[in-house]
Amino acid sequence: MIDCRHVIGRMWEYLDGELPEDEAEEIRAHLDVCGRCNPQYQFQIRFLSAVVASRPGEGAPSPALAGRVKAALDSIGPDIHPAG
Ligand SMILES: [Zn+2]
């Protein structure tokens, strides 16, 4: 079982889709159950979605990342969608 420090340390790579699938799966499972990492994860999703939204098209981090952020937002639910 991975611990919180590992999850927090890998979170950007996880969000960017850079982790191998088995490690991403471990982190996903941890985020599902951890009351410490999950709020941190949701905060980073919100931050990323703001970055993606503020830089449409050219200069956006990557289409894959934008899609991943959107999918993560959808999976979390409507509560944290940024205004606008
Ligand atoms: Zn944790």
Image: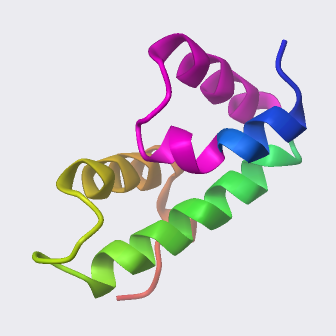
User: What residue appears at the point 23 percent right and 72 percent down from the top-left corner?
Assistant: 60
Q: How is the image coloured?
A: rainbow
Q: Position of residue 31 (x, y in %)?
A: 71, 35
Question: In the rendered image, which quarter is residue 49 located in?
Answer: bottom left
Question: In the rendered image, which quarter is residue 6 located in?
Answer: top right
Above or below — where is 26 with respect to 36?
A: above
What span is colored magenta in the figure?
11-34
- Of residues 70 and 54, which is closer to you in this image? 54
User: In which quadrant will I find the N terminus?
Assistant: top right
Report if residue 13 lies within the magenta region. Answer: yes
- Of residues 80 and 49, which is closer to you in this image? 49
User: What residue appears at the point 46 percent right and 16 percent down from the top-left corner?
Assistant: 21
Magenta stretch: helix, strand or loop mostly: helix
Above or below — where is 1 with respect to 33?
A: above
Q: Position of residue 17 (x, y in %)?
A: 41, 37
User: What residue appears at the point 53 percent right and 39 percent down from the top-left corner?
Assistant: 14
Q: Position of residue 7 (x, y in %)?
A: 75, 36
Q: Is residue 7 left or right of residue 58?
A: right
Question: In the rendered image, which quarter is residue 18 located in?
Answer: top left
Above or below — where is 84 with respect to 35?
A: below
User: In which quadrant will I find the C terminus?
Assistant: bottom left
User: What residue appears at the point 64 percent right and 45 percent down from the top-left corner?
Assistant: 11
Count of residue discs: 0
Q: Position of residue 10 (x, y in %)?
A: 66, 40
Q: Residue furthest left?
A: 57
Q: Is residue 25 left or right of residue 49?
A: right
- Of residues 2 and 43, which is closer to you in this image? 2
Report if residue 26 lies within the magenta region. Answer: yes
